[in-house]
Image (spheres, grey):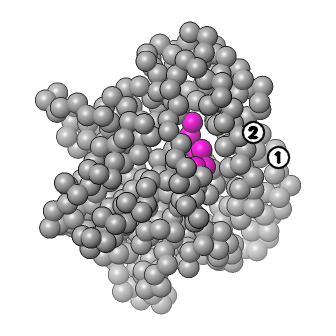
Amino acid sequence: MILFNEFKREYEAIRTEIDAALRRVLDSGWYILGKEGEAFERKFADYLGVRHCVGVANGTEAIALALRGMDIGPGDEVITTDMTAFATVTGIVQAGATPVVVDIRPEDGLLDERLIEAQITPRTKCIVPVHLYGQSCDMDAILRIARAHGLKVMEDCAQAAGTTYRDRKAGGWGDCAAYSFYPTKNLGAYGDGGAITTNDDATAERLRSLRNYGQTVRYHHDYEGINSRLDEMQAAILRVKLRHLDTWNVRRRTIAARYRAGLTAVECLTEHTYGLPNYHLFVVRAKDRTALSERLAREGVGTLIHYPVPIRRQGAYHGPCKDMPRTPTDDFADAILSLPMYPTLTDEEVDTVIRAVNHA
Ligand SMILES: Cc1ncc(COP(=O)(O)O)c(C=O)c1O
């Protein structure tokens, strides 16, 4: 049995460090907005090469607050991709803005930046590139469009902790970036968590207030904020796990290379040479995805689909509108399958998955 995700092995490997970190928090008697959170924010900002990191409660609120921190809200349009976690648009809507989605490129699943300009209107304020599956979007191209039209860029880095684009980490290219520390993420908490990064001092200050009821000084509220804080336990866990992130991402890339070398019955997505993906997910395209996933399930290999329904076809927005013309995103959604991918996967397990996939 090869699970799609496996958490216990990782905890076993770092149990001593995690237990010590949790004990430190428990012994401190301080659980919200304290030294652990501050230390993690500093370390994560340094790791990414950005000036500020603001810890929040989850990745969805990181997106919403990042947009609000840049004064984007009701009446504004935000351009993002049709192939992403629904949470990307949940965050945009939570900020009060209107999401506008563009198609993807079928070879990599990433937002096709050539389609952005056609969607820009006088109300467009921001582009949200999603570094899907842990591979960076083409940030030079996106930033060029943003600059030409006076738009902000907010990178959705929920799946991209440690990913690089050219010589720098993803998340350091736009005006802000949003991270999720949901347990499945490459840098995952043992609960919910998130963060926003930015190089802008004023935005960071505003975000610190927005995440804490809009409070600037205790019981003085200059903004209508929310309660979205990264708690001390999760921050302490993330401090430990950040120390291992690069090693874990190297292992993920090694597993990806093994999959690429061995898989013959399915198509792997394009890996760009402009950066290093963190392989949050390993996604393939199959001719008959349903038959493959059912057979793999019978053979004890866990798989998932990221994502089976494009954003614009979700019931929450336009509903399953039959008249909508099919797009590359629809074809992609129908063909993709995510195979097991985590650092504690053994070479033998990877080979078992390869054999199971190839043996049609
Ligand atoms: C691309 C993307 N954006 C946003 C999110 C939202 O993060 P969270 O689940 O922490 O709210 C996720 C994770 O689920 C994600 O994968």
Residue 281 counted in the magenta span:
yes
The image's mark for residue 312 is none
- In the image, residue 268 sits, relative to residue 203, either above or below, namely above
Q: Earlier in the sequence, mark 1 or mark 2?
A: 1
**Quarter occupied by the N terminus:** top right
Question: Are the residues tagged 1 and 2 within 8 Å (C-beta)?
Answer: yes
Residue 129 seen from this side: yes
**Quarter occupied by the C terminus:** top right
Q: Is residue 110 left or right of residue 41?
A: left
Residue at the disc numbered 2: 344
Check disc 2: other Cα within 10 Å, few if <14, some if 14-19, many if 20+: some
Q: Is residue 305 left or right of residue 276?
A: left
Residue 5 counted in the magenta span:
no
**Which residue is the extreme one toward the front?**
273
Of the pair 246 and 7, the residue shown nearer to us: 246
- In the image, residue 69 sits, relative to residue 192, either above or below, namely below
- Which secondary structure is most common in the magenta stretch? loop
Instruction: Name the residue at 70% across, 61% down.
Output: 242
**Which element type, helix, strand or loop, lies under badge 2?**
loop
Q: Is mark 1 within 8 Å of ligand 1?
A: no
Instruction: Name the residue at 61% across, 10% down.
Output: 359
Where does the image place residue 327, in percent across and percent down from the top left? Answer: 25, 34
Three-letter code, disc 2: Thr
Residue at the disc numbered 1: 13
Q: Which residues are magenta?
A: 277-282
**Which element type, helix, strand or loop, lies under badge 1?**
helix
Instruction: Name the residue at 77% across, 32% down.
Output: 346
**Which residue is the extreme one toward the top?**
360
Three-letter code, disc 1: Ala
Of the pair 59 and 285, the residue shown nearer to us: 285
